[in-house]
Each structure stands twice: as C-alpha cells, then as structure tokens.
Image: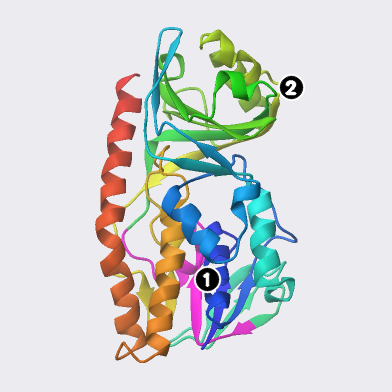
Amino acid sequence: MKITILGSCLSGMALALRLIHSKHEVEICLPETGLESCSSGYLFNSVSFESLSSLGLNLRKWVTPLRGGRAHAASDQIEAESGSHLFSADSLRLHQEIQKSVGEDRYRFDSRFSHFEPRVGYHIKSAQFENGTEALADLFVGADGVQSVVRKEQVPGPALSLVQTHQISGTSKFSDSDSVLRGRVISYRVPQASGELIIYPVDSGTVSWRLQVDARGPLHTGTSSEELRQQVFQWSRDWPTELHPIFEESAITAVQSTKCSDRRLPHLFHKDNVVLIGKAAHPTLPDLYSGVDSDLEDALLLGDLLDEFEKGHFDSLDVCLTEFIRQRRPLLNSRIRRARAQQKRVLSTS
C-alpha cells in the first residue's frame, strides 16, 4: 500500500516514522519550504516518550524530563504538586530527528494541498498541489491541522465553531530555569488577563509557556508578535517576581496567538481512502496540559491498524479505519470534557 501524508503537523510526521518502521511505502507532503519550529516546545507524557523511543528515536539524550503534572500559584507563592511524568522537547529538533529516521527523500516540501482527483465519487486517486504537481496513493492521510483543507475537501463532519478563548503560546530565553522551575510544569491563574498559564523548561536555557485568556479581552488573532510581547510583558508584572525574567520582551524569542475552536467528534475520521489524524481529525479545544499526546497516539494506533489491515485482519480498509475512531473516541471525549472544563475556569475569572 502506498500512503501519502498531507500536512506538516507532528501527527503526520510521527505516522510516517511509524509506517517506515513496518516497511510501508510512504511520502509526506508539506506546504512549507523546509522544516519549521512551533512557537512553544512540545509537551508529552511517558507513554508517548516510550512509543517514540521504540521507533528508533534516541530521545533520552536531549529531551527534558519533568515532574509535577500541575502546580498552582496563590498570590506570590508557587506550590508544586506531584503528578504524572512528562517530557518536553524542542519542536524543531524533534522534527529534524524524525526526518533523519524517515529519510529526507520521503519529504516533499513546497507541496501545498489544493484538492483531490477525481472530484466526483468516493475513491480518491491523486492529491493535487498548488504548485501543479500531484501525488498518487492508495491511502491519503490529512495531517494539516485545525483549519484542515483535507477535512473541508473530503471529510467535513460537524461544524467547527470558534469559542471565547485565545491561546497564546511562546518560548523565552531563561538561563535560571533550574532554580525557578526545578524541572516542573507549573501553572498559574492569571486574573489580570482573565486566564490560566503553564510554564515548563525545554532545555537549560529555554522555557516554553502557554496562556489561555478570555477572547473578549484586548487580544485578537491579528495582533502582531510585537504587540503580543508587550501585552504579555505587561500582564507578567503582576505575576510572581521569579517569573518576571521569562516574560521580558527581549527574552521572548517566539510568540503566537490563536483563537480556540471546538466541535463534537464526528461519526468517522475517514471517507473511503482518505483519513484524518491529529488536529485535522479532532480540532477541539486545546487542553493546556495534554500537550501533543493525542497527535502521537493517533499516529501510532493508525500505524498499528494499517499493519493489521495489510496482514488481512480486516475485511476492508473501511472496517480498518472505522476501528481507528472506535478505539480513539473514549479518550478523546475525555480530553474534550477536560478542555471544556478548563475553558469554563478561564471564563469564570473574567
């Protein structure tokens, strides 16, 4: 089976790694001209860590182990809680390590998805790109994020609705993270911004952070990076003193604001030979604490099921892909409920 992955999300890259591991014919088509980093480092749990390691990635040498799934701040006191073991990783470094294992020849850059052919009927023969090229495959996987073009084109499902929260994510230079964060993920209620914040170290000189705020406040998705830096800096003046250096405008190296969205899970993640994974499949409210585990779980489970299909354990590809959402639905619904509860907390501080 030839499999073409459309999009540059981590779920697609991880799926390519999983499929190569079991000798599938794979290519990954990305709209960008090269590998890019995200505005904040990746956060994932110990199960995801072990799964990626089992596929040949030597993560232990460069990812950062964290403790304390959550910590809450009251006034100027940050109190740590014990929690599940987590790991953080520089997003660009993880993308590069996956590419090394998958093989650069399997990456097609500057391939922005346009539409499928044929346009009429169920079974898709080719993906067409804006640069005039195409990709032929037996299975197409949409891994192109929340605003997925693949989803809109082939597997629309329930409507995507915007909600009343923004998520601001960023990375800062901070050489004193060991003494302040002490290898923890910490969280902080931010009444000045009507929001909730988490901060976690990525390496010895870098920390990442995410802030969810009430969208009815001063921010909007058109806010420039410089305006975001200034706004976050102003909010941070009322936060615990030890956090101030993280949010100096000169310390923030990357920052991005996105409007959060939500929708109920669809009946299926696929239509004939096109399937969605990651945020393309479930573009639901982001949970500050869940990181990229859902994306990685999608990739690894879909890889396992496609192996089973190739061995003849499913009567058809449709049955195989239906099993994919059947197994994913309970945990995804649980995370959606948790994210919605978190949104209520954010809005309740307004």
| Whole-percent x, y for residue 149 in the image | 51, 64
| Residue drawn at point x = 29 percent, y = 30 percent | 344
Disc 1 marks which residue? 18
Three-letter amino acid code at the position of disc 1: Arg
Dot 2 alpha-carbon crowd within 10 angstroms: few under 14, some 14 to 19, many 20 or more? few
| Residue drawn at point x = 51 percent, y = 8 percent | 238
| Residue drawn at point x = 41 percent, y = 54 percent | 294
- Between 20 and 286, the one lying in front of the other is 20
- Between 40 and 56, the one lying in front of the other is 56
* Magenta highlight on residue 271: no
| Whole-percent x, y for residue 98 in the image | 64, 62
| Whole-percent x, y for residue 213 in the image | 44, 27
Asked which secondary structure carries label 1, the reply is helix
Q: Looking at the image, is mark 1 or mark 2 nearer the viewer?
A: 1
Task: Count up the numbered dots.
Answer: 2
What range is drawn magenta here? 135-158
* Magenta highlight on residue 140: yes
Asked which secondary structure carries label 2, the reply is loop
Sequence-wise, the earlier of marks 1 and 2 is: 1
Three-letter amino acid code at the position of disc 2: Ser
Distance from disc 1 to disc 2, alpha carbons, whole Å, reads 39 Å
Dot 1 alpha-carbon crowd within 10 angstroms: few under 14, some 14 to 19, many 20 or more? many
Disc 2 marks which residue? 250
Left or right of 147 on screen, residue 99? right
Above or below 214: residue 193: above
Left or right of 305 on screen, residue 118? right
Above or below 326: residue 296: above
| Whole-percent x, y for residue 28 in the image | 62, 72
- Between 161 and 88, the one lying in front of the other is 88
